[in-house]
Image (cartoon, coloured by chain):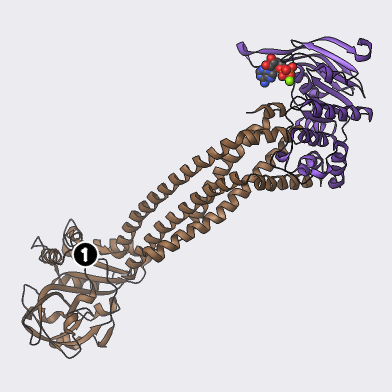
Amino acid sequence: MKEVKRFLQNIRFSLQGLGSNKMTSFLTLLGIVIGIGSVIGLMSLGQGTQESIVSDLEDLGTDIVTISAGANMYDSPVMSENADEKDFNQGLQEKYSVVDESIKLTIDDYNFLGEEGIENVRDVSFTIISLQDIYLEDEESAESYSVVGTNTDLFDIYNFECESGSGFVQADIDEGNLVAVVGSEVLEEYVVGVGDVLNIGGVEFEVVGVLVEQEDSLLGSSPSVEIYIPFSVVDEIGGDSDSEILTRIILRVEDDGVLDQTILDIEERLMEFRDVEEMDFSIFSIQTLVDRVRSITETFTLLLTGIAAISLLVGGIGISNVMLITVSQRTREIGIRKAVGGRRSDILVQFLSEAVFLTLIGGVVGMGFGILIGDLAERFLGLSAVITLDSVILAVGISVGIGILFGILPANKASRLSPIEALRYE
Amino acid sequence: MIKLTDITKVYGKGSNAFQALRDIDLEIGKGEFVAIMGASGSGKSTLMNILGVLDTPTSGQYFFNSESVEGFRDSKLADFRNMTVGFVFQRFNLLNNMSVFENVALPARYAGLRDIKSKVAESLGTVGIEDKQKNMANELSGGEMQRVAMARALIMSPSIIMADEPTGNLDSKTGVEIMELIAGLHRKGHTIILVTHDRYVANYADRILEIKDGVIVKDYERSKEL
Ligand SMILES: Nc1ncnc2c1ncn2[C@@H]1O[C@H](COP(=O)(O)OP(=O)(O)O)[C@@H](O)[C@H]1O
Ligand SMILES: [Mg+2]
């Protein structure tokens, strides 16, 4: 009982101390608040950026696997130089007129993958992509668009929906009907609708469906600006398109949790079927990209955290200066307290509790400050912020560390002095 | 009540070592009023600090009521300073940014006493400044500060009051007032140990110890000397 009373008395002393050293308390608090606020704010921005990129990517479908000819197709200039439309189109040209003409994906590869029944593979489709000049009826000027020859399964795989009309059907493929489904942004200024006629590379197609508007993808191509036609008619339009030569094979898996294994299975079986020693095709999945983006943004978050930690350190040095200035005052106080009956343990409890109160208040206010930073960045800079437990633990850990380092260590040292040494401290 | 044998105090180490007290043997009985006199730097404060367990001797024995202080743990030493001794310093040593009330109450708070309000009022009454309770310590004059320090020294009703140059920072009129208060405490039965370099101040005491270079050179009753 007596110990409890004594303990509570020391807590009361600590509150008294905070109240009577307002300036020191305030400056210390300010340092902690800024430090914690910036750590939480910056980390939440890093985390938020990562999650928004990852979720953008995941919207493209983490259950989709794409196969293309050539071992290194994603090194093509399309990925890096798509800033300017001209470069973009040029890149597209280079990309699809496969550099090594001898390496091709064919309809046989597609048929094999469709019939082989590889575990976890649900749907298989393919695309034959070419760049075509598109004329509207009665119009002179042409614009280039990618025209995708495919089968009906692609619509299932990508969950395409039409805002008007519908996708083409198996009968269109079998009968070689000249029909097209267009992305919502195709020829926006001309306004294309169901029933309109599109001149694709000199051949007239009837628009049977317009796709629901899609979010822009990060992959350089987007369904919104593409035109889909039955693969059986690609031979009829200009260019070097061939209904036997595929640009990509697209697969959808049942369970994207075991995607890595499925990709390995596909690699192995397709190499065997194509009878090659080294992979002459590449397999790509959004998941691969997500993983890569994660590791990049993690580095980014780490960088932000580093910057925040430095600011915290600078704040800490500020705090320590304030503390050092008051150390002589506080040491004399410790001397006085010991001279009138304060025990070493009393002094420690009092100063520990002062530090705990300061870091606690500073921690809570700093967290609010950090959340505010994230919120403002979200609102005015369009960034996204996510508060994670990690950042909270780190920030609170560091602030408690600062509290201990700069608050308790000097007090502990002073409490070891004899009362008279503490009183003599200048 | 107090017995010192062969007490020495060495400050610093090695070539910096300085012997402030040499082989001090001393006995002080209950109810005595002892003045420790000597020139500046002679070791008066060092001796008082050891008597008040504010500092530890380098060697020698300190018995309080026949109990060796050497074996006291930190908490027992703290309680000794809390309940047995009351200190008055030349520099007052108040907590400047706290009120007079909290300064005087401090020892009683460590002791966990009840009814602190009336005890503070009583102590402040004894030194004659009950009306300043709510003032901050740093708003007071030197004389008032020293009265507050005395009220703080008195609140636990210690048997011994130790005062190190209590009038050193005061003008002579205020000094006399403080000395009258101390003399009054002695009449009430407190043992007084007073450190001073001032013969007029020492004259309030019954017994005078003269110290020179860390050695007690004279120890006499004031009345006999006069
Ligand atoms: N902490 C210390 N470190 C080193 N020397 C000290 C210390 N305290 C006192 N001294 C020295 O010890 C001697 C006695 O000091 P003190 O007891 O304060 O003298 P007085 O109170 O008689 O003036 C002086 O020479 C002083 O310089
Ligand atoms: Mg002195």
Q: In this view, does B212 lie to the left or right of A376?
A: right
Residue B10 visible in the shown view: no
Q: How many discs appear?
A: 1
* Residue at point 60%, 37% (across, down): A326
* Residue at point 19%, 76% (across, down): A226
Relative to residue A98, is residue B202 depicted above or below? above
Residue furthest to the top: B217
Dot 1: element: helix
Disc 1 sits on a residue from what chain?
A
Check the picture and name the quadrant holding the C terminus of chain A: top right
**Where is residue A162 shown, x and y percent of the image?**
27, 84
Task: Spot the purple chain and give its letter.
Answer: B
In this rendered view, identify the residue nearer to me: A131 or B214.
Answer: B214
Res A171 → quadrant: bottom left
* Residue at point 63%, 32% (across, down): A413
In this rendered view, identify the residue nearer to me: B163 or A376.
Answer: B163
Residue at the spot of label 1: A270
Q: In this view, does A241 lie to the left or right of A26?
A: left
In this rendered view, identify the residue nearer to me: A50 or A61.
Answer: A50
Relative to residue A71, is residue B33 depicted above or below? above
Picture quarter with ligand 1: top right
Res A127 → quadrant: bottom left
* Residue at point 83%, 22% (across, down): B194
**Where is residue A22 shown, x and y percent of the image?**
62, 47
Q: What residue type is labelled 1?
A: Leu
Q: In this view, does A80 lie to the left or right of B163?
A: left
Task: Spot the brown chain and give its letter.
Answer: A
